[in-house]
Amino acid sequence: MPAWFEAWSRLPARVQDGICVVFLLVVSIGFFAPVHFSGKQLVGSDTLHWQAMAKAMMDYEEATGEPALWAPNGFAGMPGYMIRYDEVVPQLDDLPAWLRQYAWPTSHFIFLLLGTFLLVVFLTGDRLAGVLAACAYGLTTYLPVILVAGHNTKFVALCFAPWLVLAFAFVLRRPKLLPALLFAAALAVNLRAGHVQITYYVAFLLGVWWLVEGIGALREGQGKRFAAATAFLAVGAVLGLLMVAQPYLANFEYKAYTIRGGAGDGAGGLDWTYAMRWSQGFAELLTLFVADAFGGAADYWGPKPFTGGPHYVGGIVLALAVLAVIRVRRRSVRAFAIAALLMTLFALGEHFPALNRLMFAYFPLFDAFRVPETWLAAVAFALAVLAGVGLHGMCKEAGPARKPYRPPEARTAYLVFGGAAALALLLFLGKDALFDYEKPGEFEQIAAQVARRNDVAADDPRVVQAVSEYLAEARARRADMMGDDAFRTFLFLVLAGGLVVAFHAGKLPAWTMQASLVLLVTVDLAGVGRRYLNEEVLRPETDLAAQIPLLPFDQFLQAKVQEAGGPGHFRVLSLLGDPTTNARPALYYETLSGYHGAKLRLYQDFLDHILFRENGSLNQNALSMMNTRYLVGLGPLEGYRVVYRDDRFAVLENPKALPRAFFVGETEVIPSDEETFARLKDPAFDPARTALLPAPIDFETTPIDSTSTVRVELVRHTPREIVFEVETDAPRLLVVGEVYYPAGWKAEVDDAPVPIYRANHLLRAVPVPAGRHTVRMRFDPASHTVGVWVAGASTAFVYGGIVLLLGLAWRRRRASASTTAAEQEPARP
């Protein structure tokens, strides 16, 4: 046997570790080279939306040093917990957060690679298998796709996911206090990434693993050990949750009032139709194997509305994962395989209702998340781990000697790789016959657009012919894309299969075969990933705000804000885009529009049922009661005065806009939301005179006439505090044009607490006695204060416990080493 066959195994373990870590670092820096060395920034559209929504909060925090907690500009104001809510208590994730300013996204990506590497090494003891798994997971195409889109919190959560799984595995293997504390720390770090949907998916995988371990332990008479592991996992889970009491105590409180938590009572979740958008199609699962089977992002023809790119993991990874499932008899392999299968079915969403309707209705929190295809991110992780285990299993089965080889094991590997290559070749050869390469409803959609543009009927023969010709070209182009990538997958599988054959024939040592497969997987996945992450998607500006240009009409409106006395005096509605997804105005002034995945339910009602009338026209009552003084559009609108115009845009003034707070002399009780919506849209209704209440209140307001004395002056308006000086000659209800949110906002009249009632479905109302008074509203949620204290105490306990236990272990090891050395020392004469 040549000496080089054993070259890797002869290296010290620390040298092997060092080589692997350096390689992974090179992979990260190399893949993200366009970001690190081009002088440009990776800034996705969602990052720009976030910047706009968070700008007012950041300005307040910079000026006061106090957390803003409330985002005043977007959607007429909303809790800022899921926009900008920094953790107060330091934990281990602060290290990559600090590195982020110097080396994003490698600052977090290297932790993804190292975590996956260590997990597979922990499961197999095979370092090269760990490197393959790390590259397979880290370079899956979904990660660069979400980075380009700006889904940074999702990316961070996926980077920390392997550490949570590793800590879980550590507790299963060693059910003791130290592993439990490490599990708590890993859980807290993952949750602090701020994308609980990913943590939920990882927790589901761990739940499946726990069940598989439990069944196996009971069958093999290991119930006592499994019970101990379960107890320590429970302790770690509770501690981990306590460590994130800030921010999650406030987040959980907030969820009950959002579209994800029902009507404000904490019940319910997302609507099925809304939650199931972006369900992965059955045939579209082929993109795991052939990247552009459904057109990638540029010419996508799958069932989703659109996509940023595929969840590609590659033929080699899939083949190795299948090999693990077939040949490796371990509970962990069964668990990962079952979890991967179930999560793939979950990703199908509405296309597999038999399972997903049941899960949506009964499984905890399943209805709290949207975009089912996101499950495939966890599937990619499971497949990567299985691939690493499969690679190790193939080498282990062959044995240390190069001959003789056991035919069943070699035959299985040949069948798996040969079958995968044959499938790829079949897809290449049959590309024109296997699919129709047309998006569902695409013909009708394009025909309607062409007809509308040319003012003819959609079934006009000329339209039908033009659309048919266009789609014929598109189908041919899409077939070529699929065929090219199928042949690409075939080539990589042939190369990988050749390495496997050479290994089983004794021509290559295991480490050479493993290292070569690592390189193939890296080149394969990085090549597809670079289609989405390259210099073309980077932006040169260093300031994110510079990418949302300040236009002349913005300057006009900002000047009006200053003339009025600063923020809090009026809002703006932009008609230049969908108000539910247009966050741009929030960067510069207070607005009715914005962008957020968890809007307040009351405000969603306002957008859906109050802002517009049934005929699509604006409801002036809605604009007026929300203190909307200006509108931005392309031209004049009836009932609104043009106050600014350039060659593209116009600013219109709403003559009926009410001040931010005003007294009303009448109230009307309407318990039904639907009746309230109808009343608010009634042209005869005057929000300046009457406030609509959902239930009677213990306060009687006095009518206002021409002889009445009423005055309201805004003194201060910040995210945390709003102050008015008011005067009224009789007891009256003060309606404040701020969004009603009872979980934190408190009101005082001359330092005496008063209740805040809900008026006009989504506004606040405060009872004010006759006379001159100071009305103060303060946003001071107890969930924030309590969360900080609980998180601080539990974090100190967990990290202190880890340091103490590690110190005791080191001391015992040192004492043991000293005793051994003393026993071996020769006796003196």
Image (cartoon, rainbow, N blue to C red):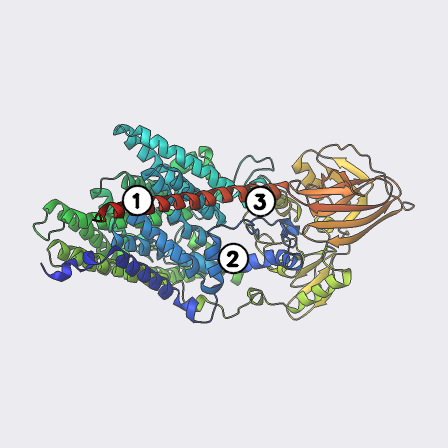
Q: Is residue 192 above or below residue 38?
A: above
Q: Is mark 3 on a helix, strand or loop?
A: helix
Amino acid of disc 2: Asp
Three-letter amino acid code at disc 3? Answer: Val
Task: Evaluate if marks 3 and 2 touch, with contact meaning CB atoms under 8 Å apart.
Answer: no
Taking 221 as reference, is 576 above or below it?
below
> Which residue is at the front of the view, 454 or 316?
316
Under circle 1, the secondary element is helix
Mark sitting earlier along the chain (3/2):
2
Q: Residue 224 location, x and y as percent?
A: 32, 28
Q: In which quarter of the image is residue 264?
A: top right
Q: What residue type is labelled 1?
A: Ser
Q: Residue furthest front?
A: 829
Task: Please count the marks in the image.
Answer: 3
Residue for point 71% across, 51% down: 623
Disc 1: CA contacts within 10 A as few (<14), some (14-19) or many (>=20): few
Q: Nearer the viewer, mark 3 or mark 2?
A: 3
Q: Is residue 238 above or below residue 7?
A: above
Give whichever of discs 1 and 2 has the lower sequence position: 2
- Residue under label 2: 46
Is any part of residue 490 visible from this angle?
A: no
Pointer 3 residue: 788
Residue under numbered circle 1: 816
Closer to us: 672 or 795: 795
Q: Residues within 10 Å of mark 2 (few under 14, many from 20)?
A: some
Q: Where is residue 117 in the image (x, y as percent from the top left)?
A: 32, 52
Quadrant where the N terminus sits is bottom left
Q: Can residue 179 be spotted in the picture?
A: yes
